[in-house]
């Protein structure tokens, strides 16, 4: 029973941790636009005679949403080693709830963006923490967590669209965001009541301040009862199935010399670089190209340009969700470097298609490419962290998982910068 509970818990942790990130990308844009609570009717374009370019690329919004996450992921593996998972999770819950409230009640662009920043900090802190926490469990929780993060994209986008759709719940963006406060409640319940943590994980007791930090040398340590080749097996101890029992001292990165730190991080580049390239390519597509890919009524299922963009995002998220969910079931998957190459080819093709629109004559063809993009991105994510679970010793695994989790955010940051320049360049070209 505990195995299923832990898998369900990691799935919900992935879902809840990424939920605010997904919602903010949509909600912040609504609130920043004048009259967003009563949007006018949108119709498809009978003919397209010029490029429809907004003054600012959506890559700008992406940068505001990703830089705080990158900062927290960069410092977390080194500075948060002595911070218990209980404290990290509490901070994540508070940041997420605060983000929903701040963006909901904001009446200026700056205040709304400050809420997006809070959501980004919470998401980054959560990802580096839960991936590190997975080192104390069988590798199957990586697939569960990855599936949950993919589910956040699908369910988050659909939930916000349903709540604000005039034909459905018909809530204003403010009301929809306040309704999302149920997510931090589920988030808290999942970690403190649903998840079964092993005794080796340091726990905080509120009435004992000495437990609020992990003493140097104490750590939350892992005891490899099993060799690496048997890493996916689980142990039973007092009925707590699905928890990896552990007893080796934790890896203290801060205690290493500068040369030792470099030698500890250098082998991780083989995981980080391909994953960063995958995320660079897909977010360059999503935030730099898709807004420029517009079809007329006859070739776009009579969807308005804004609706076409929203459906592209939904299809991308569906692809991510499918591949992250099936990541632990598919017996073989290409190396992440191959997936990175395919995603870069994908971005190159879509760049050409935005310049020469005849390369993609119909919305359906473009939708297929976007779905494929999501499948590649989700596969690369889950394959990277499952491979690390198998190849890296338990002694270094928590540290390694935390470090490598930075790479996707770094790739997204570069994508945001590239998207702005590409958007501006393409918008100067004739149709």
Image (tube, helix red, strand yellow):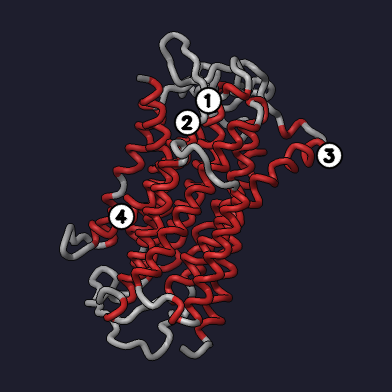
Is 282 on the left-hand or right-hand side of 43? right
Count neighbours of disc 1 (C-alpha within 10 A) and say few if under 14, some if 14 to 19, many if 20 or more: some
For the residues labelled 3 and 2, the Cα–Cα distance comes to 34 Å
Q: Secondary structure at mark 4?
A: helix
Judge the density around disc 3: few (<14), some (14-19), many (≥20) Cα neighbours within 10 Å: few
Of residues 272 and 65, the one drawn nearer to the viewer in this rendering = 272
Judge by depth and name the residue closer to the eye, 424 or 301: 301
Between marks 1 and 2, how big is the CA–CA gap? Answer: 7 Å
Q: Position of residue 413 (x, y in %)?
A: 58, 60
Query: Marks 3 and 1, how far apart in space?
Result: 32 Å
To which residue does mark 2 refer?
140
Mark 1 or 4, which is nearer the eye?
A: 1
Q: Nearer the viewer, mark 2 or mark 4?
A: 2
- Camera-side residue of 92 and 169: 169
Q: Which residue is at 58% across, 27% downward?
A: 213
Question: Which of marks 1 and 3 precedes in the sequence?
Answer: 1
Mark 3 vs mark 2: in front: 2
| Location of mark 4 (residue) | 177
* Res 398 quadrant in image: top right
Element type at mark 3: helix
Q: What whole-number distance in Å separates the C-alpha atoms at marks 1 and 4?
A: 39 Å
> Are there few (<14), some (14-19), or many (20+) residues within 10 Å of tag 2?
many
Secondary structure at badge 2 equals helix
Quarter assignment of residue 33: bottom left
Which circle's residue, 4 or 3, is located before the other in the chain?
Answer: 4
């Amino acid at each position: 029973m505990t195995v299923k509970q832990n898998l369900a818990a990691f799935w919900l942790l992935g879902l809840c941790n990424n939920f605010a990130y997904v919602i903010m990308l949509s909600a912040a844009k609504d609130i920043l636009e004048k009259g967003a609570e009563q949007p006018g009717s949108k119709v498809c374009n009978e003919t397209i005679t010029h490029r429809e370019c907004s003054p600012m690329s959506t890559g700008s919004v992406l940068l505001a949403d990703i830089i705080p996450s990158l900062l927290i992921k960069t410092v977390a593996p080194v500075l948060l080693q002595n911070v218990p998972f209980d404290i990290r999770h509490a901070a994540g819950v508070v940041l997420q709830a605060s983000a929903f409230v701040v963006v909901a009640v904001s009446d200026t662009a700056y205040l709304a963006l400050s809420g997006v920043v809070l959501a980004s900090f919470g998401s980054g802190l959560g990802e580096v923490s839960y991936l590190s926490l997975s080192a104390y469990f069988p590798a199957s929780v990586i697939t569960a967590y990855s599936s949950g993060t993919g589910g956040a994209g699908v369910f988050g986008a659909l939930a916000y669209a349903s709540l604000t759709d005039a034909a459905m719940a018909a809530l204003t963006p403010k009301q929809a965001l306040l309704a999302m406060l149920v997510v931090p409640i589920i988030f808290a319940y999942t970690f403190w009541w649903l998840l079964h943590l092993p005794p080796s994980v340091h726990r905080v007791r509120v009435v004992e301040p000495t437990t609020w930090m992990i003493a140097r040398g104490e750590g939350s340590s892992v005891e490899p009862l099993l060799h690496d080749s048997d890493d996916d097996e689980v142990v039973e101890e007092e009925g707590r199935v699905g928890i990896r029992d552990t007893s080796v001292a934790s890896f203290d990165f801060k205690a290493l010399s500068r040369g030792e730190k470099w030698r500890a991080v250098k082998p991780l580049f083989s995981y980080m670089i391909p994953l960063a390239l995958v995320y660079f390519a897909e977010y360059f597509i999503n935030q730099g190209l898709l807004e420029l890919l517009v079809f007329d009524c006859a070739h776009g299922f009579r969807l308005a340009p804004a609706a076409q963009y929203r459906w592209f995002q939904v299809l991308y998220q569906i692809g991510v969700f499918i591949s992250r969910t099936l990541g632990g079931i598919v017996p073989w998957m290409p190396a992440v470097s191959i997936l990175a190459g395919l995603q870069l080819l994908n971005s190159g093709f879509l760049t050409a298609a935005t310049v020469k629109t005849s390369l993609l004559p119909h919305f359906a063809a473009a939708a297929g490419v976007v779905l494929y993009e999501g499948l590649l991105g989700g596969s690369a994510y889950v394959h990277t962290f499952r491979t690390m679970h198998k190849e890296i010793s338990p002694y270094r695994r928590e540290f390694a998982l935390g470090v490598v989790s930075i790479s996707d955010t770094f790739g997204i940051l570069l994508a945001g910068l590239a998207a702005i320049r590409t958007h501006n360049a393409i918008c100067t070209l004739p149709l």
